Amino acid sequence: MNGIRVTAEQLNDRLKDYRPGETVEIAVFHQDELHTLPVILAEPRPTQYQIVPVERPSRKQEQHFAGWLGVSLAEV
């Protein structure tokens, strides 16, 4: 990446040096040929989510919850 060898384990740490919208050069081997490709970095996506209870959920929120989990909020 940009002339520096990066392993899969190092990739996330190396990407911290760049901002969304920046272009980095990625060199890859494909069928024994070296290819260099420009890549425009996007906004990072979450890798995990946390579900937290709402004190007074609306009727719509209760419906979404039941539709998602297949049980009513009152049952949980």
Image: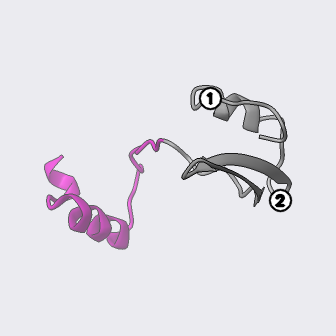
Query: Between disc 2 and disc 1, whose residue precedes?
Result: 1
Identify the residue under disc 2.
Answer: 21
Q: Nearer the viewer, residue 31 or 46?
A: 31
Query: Gap in Å between the C-alphas at discs 2 and 1?
Result: 22 Å
Q: Quadrant of residue 3?
A: top right
Would you say 34 lies left or right of 47 here? right
Q: Secondary structure at mark 2?
A: loop
Q: How many numbered badges does the structure rendering display?
A: 2
Q: Specify start and end residues of the magenta stretch as a single range.
A: 48-76
Numbered circle sitting on residue 75: none
- Rate crowding at label 1 as few (under 14), some (14 to 19) or many (20 or more) other CA atoms within 10 Å: few
Disc 1 residue type (three-letter): Thr
Disc 2 residue type (three-letter): Gly
Q: Position of residue 53 (x, y in %)?
A: 38, 46
Numbered circle sitting on residue 7: 1
Q: Is 71 situated above or below 52?
A: below
Q: Quadrant of residue 69?
A: bottom left
Q: Quadrant of residue 51?
A: top left
Q: Nearer the viewer, residue 51 or 28?
A: 28
- State which mark lies toward you, 2 or 1: 1
Quadrant in the picture for the N terminus? top right
Q: Position of residue 66 (x, y in %)?
A: 21, 64
Q: Nearer the viewer, residue 63 or 48?
A: 48
Residue displayed at 81% across by 50% down: 25
